[in-house]
Amino acid sequence: MVVILLGPPGVGKGTQAARLADAEGWEHVSTGDLLRAARRDGTDLGKKAQAFMDAGELVPDSLILDLVRDHLKGVAPEAGILFDGFPRTTAQAEGLGGVLGQVHRRVDAVVVFEAPDETLVQRLSGRRSCPDCGAVYNVHQNPPAKEGICDRCGGTLVHRADDKPETVRHRLEVYQELTAPLIAWYEKAQARLVRVPADRPVDDVQAAFRAAVR
Ligand code: AP5
């Protein structure tokens, strides 16, 4: 099964994808997480991506496609794959189609999470992330047991630089301009596309997500 999870910043893609991928033993491919790991490791890609990410702009398609191609080399050909935050442009969707075609696979389902902008801005203002293990918390909805410390690995939690309100607003504009058109693109390509209201408790969204990919 190859599933794409689309949706604006803060809608809960990472939270839900991690849960579903863990439960199903699927490969969770988050280009945001891969880019943040590259930045932490100080790789060339990480250095090139840094300014785009901090400004809330998309990283250029060619860098993202190389990153995904490279990552997929380490994934078993028959593994379930859940793409989170990728593709984000038509060029990336076309590139993904090519990569999957080479191994005789295709996109089986596209799930679109939806929530009002006010919810997204509020969630991102309260998000705290662990740069060491990738765990995600929310100071309002899902705080860690000890303020500022990751429950899972003891790392120091951070408020991502791109979660500042003005950068979040820009990321929402970029989503509407470059990524939201992929919904119509996949509908035209006759992919199975399911919209999931994501302005609900985490467990309810997870249940709807599971139903969408069943
Ligand atoms: P990326 O890391 O992919 O960010 P994003 O898509 O903007 O999504 P977020 O991580 O902000 O949010 P999310 O939907 O995963 O929500 P989360 O589960 O954390 O990308 C960052 C940057 O990298 C981009 O701006 C770009 O520069 C670059 N990039 C990445 N991929 C790229 C690509 N393909 N092409 C080009 N550039 C790329 O939840 C948010 C908060 O809400 C958390 O605090 C969580 O605890 C809380 N929450 C989640 N669900 C619920 C719920 N149901 N109820 C209440 N709270 C909830």
Image: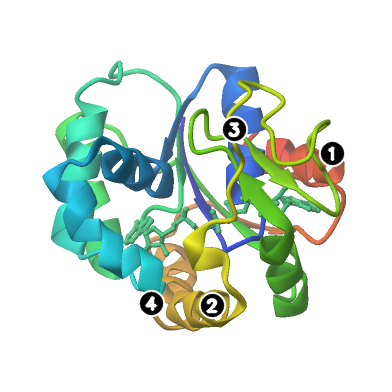
**Amino acid type of the residue tagged 3 in the rendering:** Ala
**Amino acid type of the residue tagged 4 in the rendering:** Leu
Query: Which marked residue is nearer to the observer: mark 2 or mark 1?
Result: 2
Check contact, mark 3 vs mark 4: CB within 8 A: no
User: What kind of element bears circle 2?
Assistant: helix
Question: Real-space Cα distance between discs 2 and 1?
Answer: 25 Å
Q: Residues within 10 Å of mark 4 (few under 14, many from 20)?
A: few
Residue at 69% x, 68% y is: 120
Earlier-in-chain disc, 2 versus 3? 3
Query: Looking at the image, can residue 28 be seen?
Result: yes
Question: Real-space Cα distance between discs 4 and 2?
Answer: 10 Å
Q: Please state if 127 lies on the left or on the right of 69 as rendered.
A: right
- Mark 3 C-beta closer than 8 Å to ligand 1: yes
- Residue position for label 2: 172
Earlier-in-chain disc, 4 versus 2? 2
- Residue position for label 1: 203
Q: Please state if 169 lies on the left or on the right of 139 as rendered.
A: left
